[in-house]
Image (cartoon, rainbow, N blue to C red):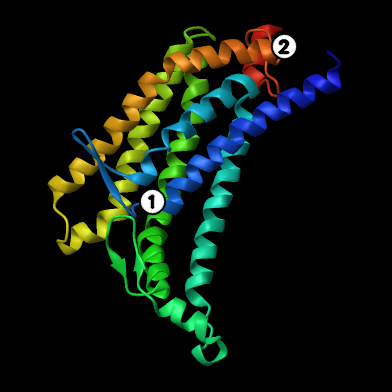
Amino acid sequence: MGPHLLQERRERVFLVLAGTFLCAMTLLNVIGITRFVQLGPMALAVGVLPYPLTFLCTDLVCELYGKARANFLVSVGLGLNFLILFVLFLGNSIPSVPADSMPPWQIIQLAAPVPLPNGEVVENSIGLYQLIYATTSGAVFASMLAYIAAQYCDVQLFHFWKRITKGKYLWVRNNFSTLMSQMVDSVMVVTVTFGAAFLRGDITLKALAVLVGSNYLFKATVALLDTGPFYLAVHYLRRYLHLEDGAYAAAHAMDTTERSARS
């Protein structure tokens, strides 16, 4: 295979990993805490369900493309967090179209009750946006703080464990980096989202602990279960991308310590 075709293949794989990462992160922010679901003993916000994929994607990017590319991906995700928050704020701040400027059919449509999938009914579509804004904007801010701490922590810990184990024991850097960073994420996102409600007395400490525990139990379980898929993905992607053990698909991705170790 020619170098240009190989480079295109490597960039396409990175695009798939980056797209999956950004999609899961965006879903967390958009659907956020709009609904809570019960999975056995765990009470989870629906936005949490795809979130463990972000850690799998960053670990794969760390392993195949290096620390710099993983940090770049996390930084792009942080920028999208700001974009989501800005669009929500903008949509809430701009005045609505005056009723006398709308055609009659549109006034009727906006004023009509909006049934929700859970059986509840919102008074009108304007009220629906206010509901989305109220339940999403605070969660986005909380997830931004948790995202900054957890995702950068995951990248740093992954390479820390890789140095400690001298590139061996793939399961150690995959699991230990993810489990530790997801604990940071679970504690931060719940405490920031519901901290004000707790201080007002609207939510108890026990309820906060249940939310933190449920979030972490779900994320930790998924992290342990994805060890097998992570091994398979690394094995087949290294062959698909024509990478030797310890080599990276991104140019100039090898950091100083790894360069000196190989020289």
Q: Quadrant of residue 172?
A: top left
* On screen, residue 83 above or below 245: below
- Looking at the picture, does residue 12 appear above or below residue 47? above
Residue positioned 46% across, 32% down in the render: 53
- Element assignment for label 1: loop
Quarter of the image where the N terminus is located: top right
57 displayed left or right of 192:
right
Residue 215 placed where, x, y %?
29, 38
Residue at screen point 33% across, 34% down? 183
Sequence-wise, the earlier of marks 2 and 1 is 1
Give SS at disc 2: loop
Q: Residue 34: where, in percent of width, then height?
A: 34, 55
Residue identifier under label 1: 32
Depth check: give the residue in front, 236 or 147. Answer: 236
**Residue density around tag 1, few if under 14, some if 14–19, many if 20 or more, within 10 Å:** many
Q: How many marks?
A: 2
Q: Is residue 245 above or below residue 35?
A: above
Q: Is residue 260 visible?
A: no
Query: Mark 2 highlights which residue?
Result: 242
Three-letter residue code for mark 2: His
What's under tag 1, amino acid-wise? Gly
**Residue at image point 38% right, 38% down:** 49
Gap between marks 2 and 1 measured at Cα: 39 Å
Would you call the spot at circle 2 few (<14 residues within 10 Å), some (14-19), or many (20 or more)? some
Q: Is residue 197 above or below residue 174?
A: below
Of the 4 image quadrants, the one containing the C terminus is: top right
Q: Residue furthest front?
A: 105
| x and y, in percent, of residue 19 in the image | 60, 38
206 relative to 2 in the view: left or right = left
